[in-house]
Amino acid sequence: MADLVIKNGKVVTPCGIIEGGIAVKNGKILKVGSEANLPSAERTVDANGNFVIPGFIDVHTHIGIGAPIGPAFDKRWQSQFTTETEGAIHGGVTSLRTTLWAKESYLPLIDKYIAWGEQNSYIDFGIYPCLIAPAHIDELVPMAERGMPSWKCFYDPYEAEEGEQVFGRPAHTDAGKLYRAMAIYAEWGYPGLVMIHAENYALYTMLQAKLIKEGRKDLKAWSDSRPNICEAMMIESAAMIAEETGGSLYIVHMSTGEGVDICKKYQDKGVNVIAETLPCFLTHTKHVHDEFGVWGKINPPFREKSDIVRMFEGIRTGVVTNIGTDHCAYTRKEKEQEVGKYGDVWKVQPGLSGGMEHWLPIMFTECFNKGRLSVEQIVKVCCENNAKVFGLYPKKGAIQEGSDADLVIVDPDKEGKVDENFYHCINKDYSVYWGWKLKGMPVMTIVGGRIMVEDGQTIGKPGYGRFLPSRRY
């Protein structure tokens, strides 16, 4: 007998959509197929003809962000694992990966952060360290052996004063450190890879100073200070380093059409360049100041409609293979920094909140229901590829026998609205999707075979999630 059976669903598997259901036992998928071939179960759930998909895997989040490295960050890390992962399960996200930063060695610290996550998380989680201190280079392999073989590198933002303000020290990665890190992981093997935030520090600081002198402080000024070339030139040089070293390069939050072209060029040459984008880079342009003001400050910034078109083309052609959210947990007060919604854009926090909760509804509203992507394509870039790239497949990211029973029932016709009743995470009263009407909502979320959200109510408890190491191939 199974623990749980889901029947009457359109089950999205790696081999296509199956009309039928899923049997679950001991947290794993026991069987996938027609209802006649499923065993009896302690509980049966009727999917009512809706899609049953793997839980989304958010490979790009920032739990604990908003506090300097030290006790304040530690406190936020613990509390946000509860608030943000409750939001995640309401949004159909069943696993996440989050960054960890420290000015000293990670090795003596990592166990406490894993323990705090397991005590407070509703969902399984992985960790990717941030390459900040020069000594961190020597920890790439030891941390990889602990299940954390992908590192975030700022190539090359957060240099000098900007790095001091955010991290308490310059945190940029120059070409030399990037070369060394890629060479190390090229030798260690996959899924060892380097993740880069690609923006040119010297160029955007020069342009920012010019715009400030001109009196510009609107949201579009933020985008104008970081034009497409800032991202494109760093992607190009990083891809050259990947080609030279044989390493694997992962571009986080890629926002430009030029980035799509560069990635394709190197992919066609056989270089392992992996491109990730964000849902907001499929929906927003830099011309939204009147709607969202400083709420829309993200790094890299919103672009033009032509970049959105190119990003969709990149997804459909397999150049852009991954989507994350870059989820940052700020309250509205923390985001606005006392300047208000339409205040000085230079004085507020970069980063968007609520990503794990609105991601799936946005993908179904803006992509599936508008004919831009099929449900199979959405599952590919939000579930399967995220699991494969980071060494989690087939444990995660697929509906097949033996995989973790991380499942979401999605009603593509169910409507919702982003308002004061939408979010369960920390940002209750603001969002770059504030006021949007959505169509395509999760109606049940299952994590490891356990129903966590049903009929809009949180059923599960924090502390169910476990550390999720990347598996070496």
Image (tube, grey):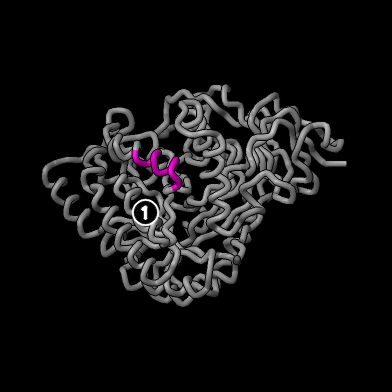
Residue 315 lies, with reference to residue 433, above or below; the image says: below
Residue 77 lies, with reference to residue 455, above or below; the image says: below
- Determine which residue is flagged by label 1: 263
What x and y, as percent, mark residue 428?
A: 48, 34
Q: Which range is magenta?
A: 310-318
Give the side of residue 174 with respect to residue 278, left or right: left
Mark 1 belongs to which amino acid? Cys
Give the side of residue 139 with respect to residue 12, left or right: left
Q: What is the quadrant of the C terminus in the image?
A: bottom right
Quarter assignment of residue 142: bottom right
Q: What is the quadrant of the N terminus in the image?
A: top right
* Viewer-closest of 142 and 418: 142
Q: Does the magenta segment cover residue 399?
A: no
* Residue 338 visible at all: no
What x and y, as percent, mark residue 300?
A: 32, 48
Main SS of the magenta part reads helix
- Hey, which residue is sitting farthest left in the picture? 214
What x and y, as percent, mark residue 308?
A: 35, 37
